Image (cartoon, rainbow, N blue to C red):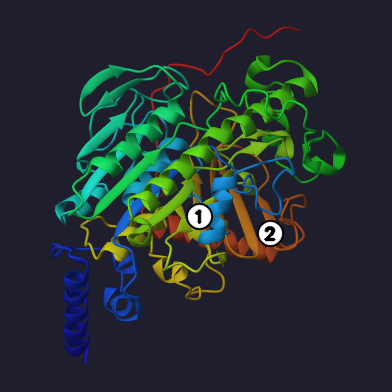
Amino acid sequence: MRSTLKDLGDALRAALRDLLGRPEPKPVRVRARAVVVLAVLAATAAVAQPRNVVVILSDDHRYDFMGFHPDAPRFLQTPNMDRMRAGGAHVANAFVTTSLCSPSRASILTGQYAHNHGIVDNTSPIPPGTRFFPQDLQDAGYQTAYVGKWHMGEVDDQPQPGFDRWVSFRGQGAYTDPLLNIDGEQVQHTGYTTDILTDYAVDWLRQRDGSEPFFLELSHKAVHAEFEPAPRHAGAYRDVQIPYPSSMWLTERNYAGKPHWVRAQRGSWHGVDFMFHGDLGPGMDGFDNFYRRYTETLLALDESVGRVLDTLEELGLAENTLVVYLGDNGFLLGEHGLIDKRNAYEESIRIPMLAWAPGWIAPGSTVDGIVRNLDLAPTVLALTGTSTSINMDGVSFLDLLAGGAATAVDREFLYEYYWEYAFPHTPTTFALRGDQYKFIYYHGVWDTEELYDIAADPEERTNLVEALPQVAADMRSRLFDRLSEDDAMRVPMRRGNWNAGERLVYD
């Protein structure tokens, strides 16, 4: 029976490759939990299933800051993200497994947790032998391009394996007049970086070889702090009223049951009382300006999404291309008295995700199943019929995009963040997050653990670690079992040599 199913799967895969003009993928070893059942997908997929993939990646974009989202600020306008949602799917429960630029971007490109790919912070070099899934696409005959922020290793902007076209910059880059590495050559540019990167992406779509399938990743700096809107958008929201989160205020209610480090962080680089060590101005004026500049910077990013969709439609590629928009991590804007990300709270680990493929994804659909950033790689490989040698932790959510049901009611996933010397305000954090409960454990500090009923308390106001001791104990046990089974009981250390915005302390 097993042999018969294998023969059927081989035949179906071959038929799908013949239909879509894809070459034979190389046979490779993959982790059992990451294996994609291509035979089933091939048998159930419509002929209109796309063969090309465009990934648009943003930075620090909150999951709820899209105009159509019921929790978005009422003044926020994102017409092109709204267009993606109206014409495709909103992946409503998308998450990262590490809420930090470099580890998240590595997870997206490897399908692995940070403890497996080894890029655990923003200064970690890429470990020798690391393989990114676009290399598999390239080997399978795909044209590939990477345009934008790479940020794996602070100083490296050199072309990486797996990409025929390379446009990037060092580290965080700049919002204006960027110095870009164009296929290995340093080229100075004038203008707004979001627009310039989009120009390169659109030009590549127009100039590529039309006879071959393609993969493009457009990776933006926006909306990373410190926010800088395009000149045409500066002041667009100057008169709006800022909707402060209820957990922002320094009250007994807000800090009952919270770890000591959370309250202490209020007066730090990543706290609302001393944001960026006071550089943004005093009190609420500074916070309001910070909030407005964030939303204004988002406007050019939304326009970039529209330009990519317009180009695909103009070139007749829309019905043959899957476009996925996602963020590399979330961002707090006052929740629990904090800004930034890194921690395991919802606003930090949840990300926006949209999927658009006319004729294949049902317009206006919603994917409710839990999807992680490390699930993108196996999903793209499943769509394209490409095999990989990467030992992936992620699983494909291709069936969810095509209208299938989630494979599990309560899919619990691991979250990890490793303490950084430059940003010491947030401790090493491990968490399990499921559909109902989230358990958070802190390593290296003597502080309380946290347990939240996410379904009943989405704002994470009430720590249940003492009220539900058995639930907490069970989740703590599962957390450590999982870390142990995956050989993740190794907390990495890095040489520290700088602090973010160090200031003198005055009495």
Q: Which residue is mark 1?
A: 354
Q: Is residue 80 left or right of residue 189?
A: right
Q: Residue at x 35, y 23 (%)?
A: 170
Q: Amino acid at mark 1?
A: Leu
Please tell me whether residue 156 is drawn above or below residue 6 in the rendered image.
above
Q: Residue at x 77, y 41 (%)?
A: 245
Which picture quadrant has residue 496? top left
Q: Residue furthest right?
A: 252
Percent position of residue 431, x then y: 55, 52
Which picture quadrant has residue 211? bottom left
Between 309 and 116, the one lying in front of the other is 309
Q: Which residue is mark 2?
A: 454
Whole-Å distance between the Cαs marked 1 and 2?
A: 22 Å
Between 148 and 48, the one lying in front of the other is 48
In the rendered image, is residue 44 in sight? Answer: yes
Percent position of residue 309, x then y: 43, 49
Please tell me whether residue 224 is drawn above or below residue 364 in the rendered image.
above
